[in-house]
Image (tube, rainbow, N blue to C red):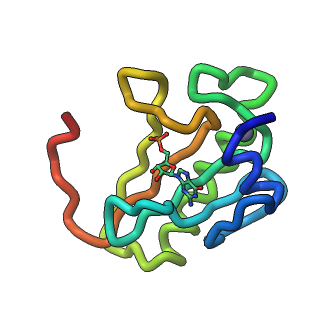
């Protein structure tokens, strides 16, 4: 499958890992929009939030159980933002479900 994030999971494209287990991989965004900008992705290919269903939602729960740990280990002691873009209007560019963890400064209130 021609999916850049599946290639990162397979190790075909290098990434700076922040966390990994059987369900997920977290790595630093190549084009950070904040001092800390980590992407958390399921190892299973799910295209977006639109592709979450009763058969695959366990990994989403696991990701949200783990995000606080990833954030803490990245030094985000004063809060952080978790974002997922779904579809064209949200400007989703990579069609593999991912959650942005952003922080390390006071982020803008206005999200557009
Ligand atoms: P989206 O716009 O789909 O919500 O976010 C995709 C994110 O993936 C962007 O922030 C972009 O910088 C990041 N990204 C795209 N390709 C790569 C890559 O090859 N490596 C890493 N580390 N991040 C990537
Ligand atoms: Zn994928």
Instruction: State the quadrant of the N terminus.
Output: top right
Residue 89 percent location from the top left of the image: 36, 21
- From what the image shows, is residue 54 above or below residue 34? above
| Residue visible at 70% across and 21% down in the picture | 53
| Residue visible at 60% across and 32% down in the picture | 95
Q: Nearer the viewer, residue 65 or 30?
A: 30
| Residue visible at 59% across and 53% down in the picture | 40
Tell me if 81 is positioned left or right of 39 in this view.
left
Picture quadrant of residue 39: bottom right
Residue 29 percent location from the top left of the image: 50, 61
> So how many labels did they put on this image?
0
Q: Nearer the viewer, residue 70 or 85?
A: 85
Tell me if 63 is positioned left or right of 100 in this view.
right
Residue 52 percent location from the top left of the image: 66, 25
| Residue visible at 57% across and 27% down in the picture | 49
- From what the image shows, is residue 29 above or below residue 46? below
Instruction: State the quadrant of the C terminus.
Output: top left
Tell me if 66 is positioned left or right of 59 in this view.
left
Q: Nearer the viewer, residue 36 or 32?
A: 32
């Amino acid at each position: 499958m021609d999916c850049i994030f599946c290639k990162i999971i397979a190790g075909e494209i290098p990434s700076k890992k922040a966390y990994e287990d059987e369900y997920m991989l977290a790595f630093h965004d190549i084009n950070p929009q904040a001092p800390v900008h980590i992407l958390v992705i399921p190892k299973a290919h799910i295209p977006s939030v639109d592709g979450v269903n009763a058969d695959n939602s366990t990994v989403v729960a696991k990701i949200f159980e783990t995000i606080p740990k990833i954030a803490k280990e990245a030094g985000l002691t004063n809060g952080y933002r978790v974002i997922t873009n779904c579809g064209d209007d949200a400007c989703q560019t990579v069609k593999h479900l991912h959650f942005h963890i952003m922080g390390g400064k006071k982020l803008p209130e206005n999200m557009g």
